[in-house]
Image (cartoon, rainbow, N blue to C red):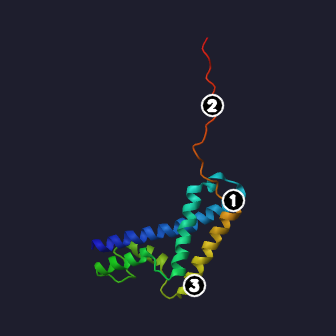
Amino acid sequence: MWYGYAADALVAIHLAYVGYVVLGQVAIIVAAPMKWQWARNPWFRFSHLAAIVYVAYEEFAGLRCPLTVWEEKLRALGGQPMASGETFMGRMFHDLLFYPDTPHIVFAVGHVAFAVLVLQACIMYPPRWFRTGGKKAAVPVPMSA
């Protein structure tokens, strides 16, 4: 029972990861023409790029997503088939992520193409670089009379 709940929590984390990559890119595409500076935040942009580059690396290296592998192991320990879930939300999240009748090549091409899209956005609307603690401007102190 607890393994099923843990697997459901893991699939929710997996969906959040995918949502971060997809919705983050949508936000960047919307923010770029508006010149919104929050979209140039280096923490956001570099973590976003790293998230999708890791997925593309998995495709090229022939690796399975560790979140999927862990979910499978937790479901097996809980005596559940992979396509099920302990809770309604777990089943719904799983169905949003996995499409059993879709060939793997569709996902592989999609992952790599999305990585190229994110990289292209980094080139066309680059993140600002991290600010260093360098010299600060001196603030004049008023003299007392």
Badge number at residue 133: none
Distance between the alpha carbons at the discs numbered 2 and 1: 34 Å
Tell me where residue 31 appears, x and y as whole percent: 66, 58
Badge number at residue 32: 1
- Looking at the rendered structure, the secondary structure element under dot 2 is loop
Specify the amino acid type for callout 3: Val
Check the picture and name the quadrant holding the N terminus: bottom left
Residue sticking out furthest to the top = 145
Specify the amino acid type for callout 1: Ala
Distance between the alpha carbons at the discs numbered 1 and 3: 28 Å
- Looking at the rendered structure, the secondary structure element under dot 1 is helix
Mark 1 neighbour class, 10 Å CA radius: few under 14, some 14 to 19, many 20 or more: some
Q: Mark 2 or mark 3: which is in front?
A: 2
Instruction: Look at the image and tell me whether residue 92 can be seen.
Output: no
Instruction: Look at the image and tell me whether residue 99 can be seen.
Output: yes
Earlier in the chain: of badge 2 and badge 1, it is: 1
Residue holding disc 2: 138
Earlier in the chain: of badge 2 and badge 3, it is: 3
Check the picture and name the quadrant holding the C terminus: top right
- Looking at the rendered structure, the secondary structure element under dot 3 is helix
